[in-house]
Amino acid sequence: MAVSGRRSGRLSVAGLIAMRPGSRTRLCHRLRAHPAGRGKRRSMGERDFIALIDGVHQLVRAPVVLVGAV
């Protein structure tokens, strides 16, 4: 994703689609801005993904099943 501005850093986004029978489908996402500079993390960490999955679980009030496609 291109962001205007000089040395503005990087944005990371992760998303899940939450479906529950009888409810409408929801797109849940987590956005994280990373400041520019050497030696700093430039991607989402494990805790970011844990927070995303936990947030979806709290939203739908049901167990979360993750399905991945390769």
Image: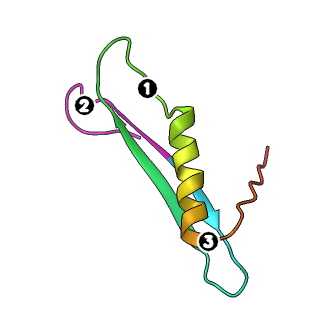
Residue 37 is covered by the magenta coloring: no
Residue drawn 60% across and 53% down? 53
Whether residue 29 is visible to the viewer of this picture, yes or no, is: yes
Q: Specify the quadrant that holds the N terminus.
A: top left
Q: Which is closer to the viewer, label 2 or label 3?
A: 3
Q: Which is closer to the viewer, label 2 or label 1?
A: 1
Contact, mark 2 vs mark 1 (Cβ under 8 Å): no
Residue denoted by label 3:
61
Identify whether 41 is placed above or below 48.
Answer: above
Mark 2–mark 3 Cα distance, whole angstroms, equals: 37 Å
First in sequence, mark 1 or 3: give its number. 1
| Span highlighted in magenta in the image | 1-13
Residue denoted by label 2:
8
Q: What residue type is labelled 3?
A: Arg
Q: What element carries label 1?
A: loop
Q: Which amino acid does label 1 sit on?
A: Arg
Residue 12 is covered by the magenta coloring: yes
Residue that extends furthest to the bottom in the rendered view of this protein: 22
The rendered magenta stretch, by its main secondary structure, is classed as loop
Q: How crowded is mark 1: few (under 14 residues within 10 Å), some or many (20 or more)?
A: some
Residue denoted by label 1:
42
Labelled disc at residue 62? none
Left or right side of 24 for 41: left
First in sequence, mark 2 or 3: give its number. 2
- For this rendering, which residue is in front, 35 or 4? 35
Question: Which quadrant of the structure image shows residue 24?
Answer: bottom right
Question: Which quadrant of the structure image shows residue 46?
Answer: top right
Q: Which amino acid does label 2 sit on?
A: Ser
- Percent from the top left, x then y, of residue 57? 61, 62
Residue drawn 57% across and 61% down? 56
Identify whether 53 is placed above or below 23.
Answer: above
